[in-house]
Image (cartoon, grey):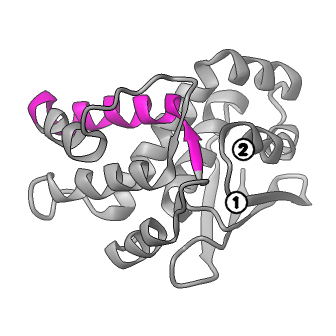
Amino acid sequence: METAEMLQLRIRAATDKDMLLGIFFDAALNTLTRLLGEAEVAAIRAEVFGKRSVVSFFRYPAADILQLVEQGVKRSKPGSRSYHQVAMELGRSAAGTFVDSQSGKMMSFLAGDKPHRLLASAPAAYKAVTTFGERSYERVSENSARMHFRADLLGPSWQQGVVEQALGSMSQIRPRVRVEVKNASGTDFTAHVEW
């Protein structure tokens, strides 16, 4: 689903106003360290951030996290990881880190283990941690829903990982997520979720 071309289009589309909390950068760097090793991630960190440090609750450019996805693929052994796989893995780690945070624990407390309540609260959670994109929730049936993403720079594979991990962690279910991409850059898409 995710391609190099889609990722490049989103990197170019990102502006200085498109920001994301540092907690997700920490999660991405930790995951890349697990996948690639400390030496590779030190090189990636220097390339993407220069001398800047990452603080969990500061905001950083969305383009930087997209460059982490790109570097995660480029620095993997040839053919070992696709853009889709790396983006999904980083999305999963972002969701896992969020679930473990105070905000995630509060969201889990309020939603309980009900998948629909969790998905219905997701658009507000996204607004709290990003400055870009629009998300909405649509209940389809007792065991299915749709999440609509518009102008989402993180892209379909990242968000598929987020949805799968969040529902698995918070609702204790194994969701099936099928993503329908609506444009060339992958900023507009619908996640069809069933459980």
Name the residue at 59% across, 19% down: 100
**Mark 2 secondary-structure assignment:** helix
In the rendered picture of this protein, how many numbered marks are placed on residues?
2
Q: Are marks 2 and 1 in contact (CB under 8 Å)?
A: yes
Please provide percent x and percent y for residue 133: 70, 60
Image point (83%, 58%), residue name:
136
Position of residue 161 relative to residue 186, above or below, is above
In the picture, the quarter occupied by the N terminus is bottom left
> What is the span of residues highlighted in magenta in the rendered image?
19-39
Residue type at numbered disc 2: Tyr
Q: Position of residue 14 (x, y in %)?
A: 52, 63
Q: Position of residue 110 (x, y in %)?
A: 88, 23
Alpha carbons under labels 2 and 1: distance apart: 9 Å
Question: Is residue 94 or residue 139 the one in the foreground?
Answer: 94
Q: Give the side of residue 161 with respect to residue 46, left or right.
A: right
Label 1 CA crowd tier, 10 Å (few <14, some 14–19, many 20+): some
Residue indicated by mark 1: 133
139 left or right, relative to 97: right
Q: Could you tell whether 146 is left or right of 141 in the image?
A: left
Does the magenta stretch mainly form a helix, a strand or a loop? helix
Q: Secondary structure at mark 1?
A: loop
Q: Which residue corresponds to mark 2?
A: 126
**Residue 171: % across, % down:** 72, 32
Residue type (three-letter) at the residue carrying disc 1: Gly
